[in-house]
Amino acid sequence: AMEIRIENPNFGFYEFPTSKGDVMYNGRLVGELKINGQRVASYSAIRREVRTEVSYKDNQGPSVLKNDINRGLIILKIGA
């Protein structure tokens, strides 16, 4: 699981619909996550826990990713 933070620096509520996020490893898509729609109060932030599975196909996964998964160390970038 990972925690995301959604910040609203504006005056007034910010409401966003359910969205999809991509999990990237060295520019390659290795997972997706769902961010449930929320309402964020003005000048505040919310934190939510999201879960996803990171995977690769044996013949398409880079060997560096396979080694990092086996070691238990993976640096990921998340974009929504």
Image (cartoon, rainbow, N blue to C red):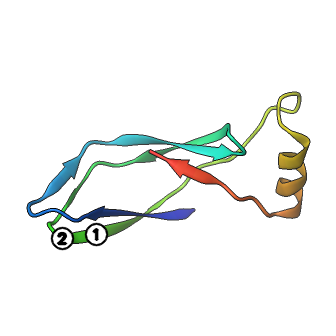
Position of 5 compared to 9: left or right? right
Q: Quadrant of the C terminus?
A: top left
Q: What's the amino acid at mark 2?
A: Tyr
Taking the spot 26% from the left edge, 42% from the top edge, the residue there is: 17
The answer to which quarter of the image holds residue 69 is bottom right
- Residue 11 numbered tag: none
Residue shown at the point (70%, 59%) measured from the top left = 75
| Percent coordinates x, y for residue 25 in the rendering | 70, 46
- In the rendered image, which quarter contains the N terminus? bottom right
Q: Which residue is mark 2?
A: 43
* Residue at position x 64%, y 44% in the image: 24
Q: Secondary structure at mark 2?
A: loop
* Residue beneath disc 1: 45
Q: Is residue 10 left or right of residue 24?
A: left
- Quick check: 17 above or below 42? above
Q: Position of residue 9 (x, y in %)?
A: 22, 65
In the picture provided, is 11 more to the left or to the right than 16? left
Residue 14 % position (x, y): 17, 55
Q: Is residue 65 above or below residue 10?
A: above
**Residue shown at 28%/69% (left/top)?**
45
Asked if disc 2 and disc 1 are in contact, CB closer than 8 Å, the reply is no
Real-space Cα separation, disc 2 to disc 1, in angstroms:
7 Å
Q: Residue 74, located in which quarter of the rendered image?
A: bottom right
Name the amino acid, label 1: Ala
Residue 63 is situated, as x and y percent measured from the top left of the image, at 91, 42
Number of the front mark, 2 or 1: 2
Element carrying mark 1: strand
Task: Name the residue nearer the viewer: 25 or 3.
Answer: 25
Q: Residues within 10 Å of mark 1 (few under 14, many from 20)?
A: few
Residue 19 lies in quadrant: top left
In the displayed orientation, state which residue is furthest to the top. 59
Taking the view exactly as shown, the residue that stands out farthest to the bottom is 44
